[in-house]
Structures are given as C-alpha cells and as structure tokens.
Image (spheres, grey):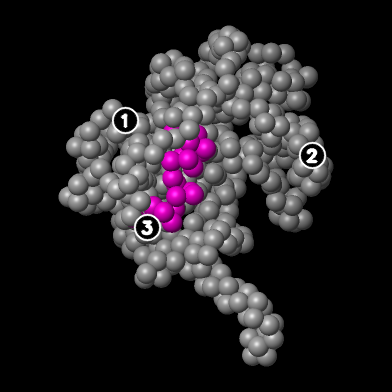
Amino acid sequence: MMRCTIALLALLTLPQAARCAAAAESAAAKKFVQDRVERVLAILKDAKLEKSAQKEKVIKVADEMFDLPLMAKLSLGKRHWPKFSPEQRDKFTDLFVTTLKASYADKIDLITDETVEFEELERKSKTKFEMITNVVSADKRYKMIYKITARDDGWRVYDVEIEGISIVRSYGSQYDQFLADHSIKDLLEKMEKKAFGQPKELEIKSEEIKNGSKAGGKKGAVGGEKGE
Amino acid sequence: MRILFLVAVLGVGTGARSVRAQEAAPAEKSVSTGTAAAAAAADEDFAEFEEEFGDEAAVDAGVRKVFDPLRGYNRLMFKVNDKFYFWLAKPLARGYRFIAPEPARASVQKAFHNLHFPVRFVSSLLQLKFKKTGLELGRFVVNSTVGIGGLFDPADRWLGWRRPGDEDLGQILGHYGVGDGFPFVIPLLGQTNLRDGLATIPTFFLNPVWYVADTPTNIGVTAGEQFNFLSLHIGEYESIKMDALDPYTFIRDAYKQNRDKNIRE
C-alpha cells in the first residue's frame, strides 16, 4: 500500500500507477466477498437468533452479494434464453431465484462448526475476479471459489464453485438436458413443483445435523426418532 | 452380519466393473453447433461470459453432449443406491452418530485418511508433484507418531502443514492424458467413471490393511470407513437431490467437474 501511494504521488511511471489502481480494485473485490462471508458466519454463530430469523438474515446478505438474475440468465445460456418469451424469462428468473435461495437456506442447516479461510484473489480478466476460500469442516477442507464481476451497481458474485463444481454450470446442464426433450412450459412447471414442495425424505432436521451426540444422548435420540 | 452383506454386494460390484472395462471406448468430443446465435449475439451478458459458460466451454467441462453409453444401467444402479441410502445406510448412520460423538468420528476419519497415505504419496510422486509428495510424507510421519496413528492432525495444527487435495491413481492417469471413458455407477459406492473405477482396483494394494488382514476383515474395515464418513455427512445427498431436476445427471456431471478440477490441480 505504502509503495503504491508513493508511486502514485511521485508519478514515477505510468505502468506502475496503473498497477496500483488495479491493486486497489483487487483489494475492493476481496473486501466485498470477505465482508459478506464474515457477516453470514456471524449471523450463524449468533446463538440468540432463532433458526428462521438466521435464515432470513443470511438470505438478505446473499441477496446483495449474488447477482441471482444474472446467474439465472447465464445458466440458461444463449442457447435457450432467446427462445424464452419475456414472460417466460421473468417466470424462470423468479423460480430460479426462489430455488437458489431455498437451497442456500437449506445448506445453512448443514453448517455446524465450519470456519472459512480466505486465500488469494485471482484476477481473471479486466472485470472478473475469483476469490479462493477454504471451508474447514470437522474432517475435511473444501475449496470454494466465489467468482465476482463488476456490475453497474457494484461488485456481484455471478457463480460459486465448490470443489470444482460450478453452480451456474450444474444448474445450466440440468436445464439444457431437460429442455432437450421437454418444452419450456414443462420446465417452468417442474421448477414450480420443486420450489413449492419437496418429498419428505429430503427434509433435513437442523437439530439432527447439529448432532444429538454433542448435546447429550437422550434428548438428541428422541429428536432423531421423530425425524422420519 | 451387515458387513457380510456389504461384502457380498461389493464383490458383485467389482466383478461388474471388470466386465465393463472390456467395453472401453474413448469419449467422443463433438464440436458444438451454434444455435439461435443470431438472436443472442446482441446480448452482451452472454458475450462477456462466453468463455466460461458458452457452448464450447460446456462441452469442454463435460456437461454437454455427455457420452454415457451405460445410461440405462447407471440410472438403475443410481436408484438402487438411493434406496440403499434412505432405507438402510442413513438410519444406521443416524443411530451410530447418537452413540459416537462427532469429534470421535472425525478423528476416526482422520486416522483412515492417514492410513491411506501410500496412495496419495505414490500418486503425487508419479505426477512429479514433489512439493505435495514431501508434504504428504511429512504429515504422515508427524501425524502417525505425535498424532497417535493419525487420530489427530498436529501437522496442520502446530506446524501449519495443511492437508493438500488428495491425489489418487485415477488422477495419475488423467494427468498423463487418459480420458475418463464414460460414467459408471458402482453398487453402493456410487458415481465414478471407467478410468477411476479401474484405478480403484490397484488402489487396494496400496492400502496397508490389505497386507495384514484377510479379505473379509479388509472389506469390513473399508465398509466401516464408508459408514463413518457417511455419519459425518448426512444431509448432503439430500441437499443435492433437492437442487436437481434430475439427480442422476446432476451427480454425474458434478462428479465429472470435480474430477477434472482435481486432475488439473
């Protein structure tokens, strides 16, 4: 930072000044992700909050962190997006956003005592960065990459890659494969059905994930019995 | 009893795998054809992200035009594994986790990981990843002794020698350009592909347990490991299933993306 300031003030060489500007931009992008991830973790660690209140707050942070409509569009891709009528696009975007938020909220139940390490920020292009993080769980470390880009209203995450698995790409291939032998109408119907009703066996009880064993045998065991 | 059952099914699985092996065929990579390109060309969002999510990128990532000749069998076995999980494995793992506290199960998992050091060591070495090879060796020595057979991870905690991404025999093949063949679902063990499935066979010989115990014990220990792992990860499969329109293709494509990343790194 110090060296940057000096370089700028002294107006030594143009390339160096440009490099400093880029460094400042990188720092801002890094801070954008780090701040929000830390906020989410703080909410999850706040024992005073009810689970539902936690979810609500976390989703609020996610809302300003991710550009969900852009992710919706990118996952359909230019193969399919143009074939959707404006109404269908709106409907699809709505359903995509609902689905992703629900999925994000569900993942919260899977988080117990994980911590996050922030590694370096990689510049991918003029407007794109990748923030590399590690999620440290009880027995493993997961590599999680936030892909960020500069949008009109500031930084936004446009994709997340967990151990190499990209959300946009994975959802995208699902839509692509579904549309290969179904209509757009079918897709929207199926998404709607999935968004508002999941089979019971997929329900994950948060107290179960939080581990009955830790809270002490009996109480947990009763909760587990009720689970299914 | 349970272990015997697992042994039986595992045995079948291995047999099936070697049969499939003979039907090996290289994966096709077809060139993507531009559709509706004219209409979309105007949209700058797509242009901006073309490199990452465009047609060609999707084909490269293996999520489009997937070569999946065993689709029928795979889907069937996926369903069988799904039922096995919900009806048997999950209820048992649940019971187990009420008995054993999480830190204990995490420690057991770490000890198993430590035990599988040879495979990671050999795989790193053969890919000439010397830094990783050294790191694995250092971690093994420290954790086996100070960490009491790998139950604890002092190498990470005290020395800052973080556990690197696991290398395995399938990754060696991938590293030297062997394609993945086609997707294959193993009974009980789940998604893999021809290359990685075959590579698990010699992996047995790099497992120290193989040399000190008879086959049933050996397979029992392996099943126990899978079971312990599962107890630490209940809810993850459910969560994936919830996200997917078609869980089989979702997991198949995710597996591919994950393997490709591990091979690249």
Q: Look at 25% across and 43% down and name the residue there.
A: A83
Q: In this view, does A224 lie to the left or right of B8?
A: left
Label 3 environment density (alpha carbons within 10 Å; few <14, some 14–19, many ≥20): few
- Tell me if residue B45 is in the magenta stretch: yes
Look at the picture and state if B72 lies above or below B106. Answer: above
Q: Looking at the rendered structure, which numbered label has been put on residue A180?
A: 1
- Label 1 and label 2: CA atoms lie apart by 43 Å
Which tag is nearer the camera, tag 1 or tag 2?
1
- Which residue type carries mark 3? Glu
Q: Look at 58% across and 53% down and name the residue there.
A: A134
- Which residue type carries mark 1? Ala
- Tell me if residue B143 is in the magenta stretch: no
Looking at the picture, tell me which residue is in the foreground, B88 or A131: A131
- Residue A165 in sight from this viewpoint: yes
Residue B88: x and y in percent read 43, 22
Label 2 environment density (alpha carbons within 10 Å; few <14, some 14–19, many ≥20): few
Please identify the quadrant where the C terminus of chain A is shown. top left
Q: Is the magenta region chiefly helix, strand or loop? A: helix
